[in-house]
Amino acid sequence: MARPRPATRSTTLAYAGDDTFAEQMKTLEIAGSVEGVRHRIAEAVTARRLVSPTELLGEIVGPEKQEEEDPEDPETVQAFAMNFLALWNEEVSRLPPGEEAEAWRASVQGMIEAEAKEAQKPYVAKPHPGRNDPCSCGSGKKYKKCCGA
């Protein structure tokens, strides 16, 4: 008996529409308008500014929102980012073919890959002295009898 083949997932990001994007911006308290975001994206792409989508998103939402560790509504944050990337991809697809455009695309793709690689690095905690290690203050005592007490 033949097993059914799983449905293939599309890797293309679909834009949810201006109304949904505006609602996400309102929910996340992001200043500006959908047209303003579209304009910023178009400006960066047509000028072939060497900026990754993540950097441009950070410029638009502001550093305090981008660095937020525990957002109140993570699903809306994710959906907003996906819609932003869909708008970015839409604008990049409008670039006329040519050597200059391809060189810019390759540079931006390199930036995106470097960001992804950086994001995958594991967190490494600072080394802490063991209980029986000499104390770092220079007293000559064991850490547990000195600063670790």
Image (cartoon, grey):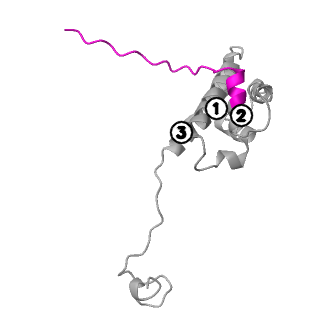
For the C terminus, the quadrant is bottom left
Q: Main secondary structure of the magenta part?
A: loop
Viewer-nearest residue: 27 or 62: 27
Q: In the visual, does 139 lie left or right of 71?
A: left
Residue plotted at (49% across, 18% down)? 10
Dividing the picture into quadrants, the one containing residue 42 is: top right
Q: Position of residue 18 (x, y in %)?
A: 72, 22
| Mark 1 closeness class: few <14, some 14–19, many ≥20 residues within 10 Å | many
Q: Which mark is residue 25?
A: 2
Indicate the amino acid at tag 3: Ala
Residue with the mark numbered 1: 80
Whether tag 2 and tag 1 are in contact, CB under 8 A, the answer is yes
**Left or right side of 12 for 68:** right
Instruction: Name the spot of residue 96 as percent of width and height, x first.
Output: 72, 14
Camera-nearest label, 2 or 3: 2
Element marked by disc 1: helix
Extent of the magenta region: 1-23
**Kind of residue at badge 2:** Met
Q: Residue at x 53, y 45 (%)?
A: 118
Relative side of 120 to 44, left or right: left
Q: Camera-side residue: 122 or 30? A: 30
Badge 3 crowding class, 10 Å Cα cut-off, few under 14, some 14 to 19, many 20 or more, is few
Question: What residue is shown with label 3?
Answer: 116
Q: Earlier in the sequence, mark 3 or mark 1?
A: 1
Instruction: Classify 116 as above or below 45.
Output: below
Residue at the extreme left of the image, as rendered: 1
The residue positioned 44% from the left and 82% from the top of the image is 148
Looking at the image, tell me whether mark 2 or mark 1 is earlier in sequence order.
Answer: 2
Q: Nearer the viewer, mark 3 or mark 1?
A: 1
Question: How many discs appear?
Answer: 3
Secondary structure state at the residue bearing disc 3: helix
Q: Find out whether the residues at labels 2 and 3 contact each other: C-beta distance under 8 Å.
A: no
